[in-house]
Image: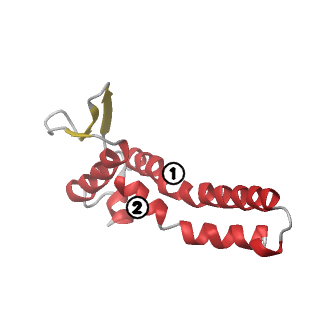
Amino acid sequence: MKEYESERNKLIPEAEAYADKIAGPKKNKKNHYEWSNSWNRAFHSKMNSLAKSLIEDYDLILQELYDSEIHWSIECFRHGGFTAKLGDERNTPKTFPILREAIKWLANQAVKHYPNSTFAAKHS
């Protein structure tokens, strides 16, 4: 989760600037409650919008692997993380505590082991 949090935290200044623009300067509002509601709504809306790119790319990676006819699998086990495997049964699977780490590993391995694929051409 640390990597996601770090990347999401980088988006805070942009979301704060947006909220300041929407809610206006704090000192000009007579009703602090009204201003803080407006600012919070704008801030969280912008953060959610910006942060979608941190998550949505992972489903695209899996689709692009599939479209490139690269075989992959991810299994999850209760309290056991996510086990990712690229290619056929001869390849050794690797286990990750976080799903996005498993997907990143699949992408890196695909570029390494399938350098002539359409996936590698796009992600190298």
- Residue at image location 32% in from the left, 61% down from the top: 120
Give the CA separation, mark 1 to mark 2: 17 Å
Disc 1 versus disc 2: nearer the observer? 2
Looking at the rendering, which quadrant does residue 28 occupy? bottom right
* Mark found first going from the N terminus, 1 or 2: 2
- Dot 1 amino acid type: Glu
Say what secondary structure mark 1 lies in: helix
Looking at the image, which is closer to me, 104 or 35? 35
As drawn, the residue found furthest toward the top would be: 78
Looking at the image, which is closer to me, 41 or 50? 41
Residue 56's label in the rendered image is: 1
Decide: few, some or many residues near mark 1? Use Cα within 10 Å; few <14, some 14-19, many ≥20: few
Relative to 19, does residue 80 appear above or below in the rendering?
above
Residue 18 place in picture, x, y as percent = 68, 70
Residue 3 place in picture, x, y as percent = 36, 57
Residue position for label 2: 6
- Residue at image location 53% in from the left, 66% down from the top: 11
Q: Is residue 34 left or right of residue 94?
A: right
Say what secondary structure mark 2 lies in: helix
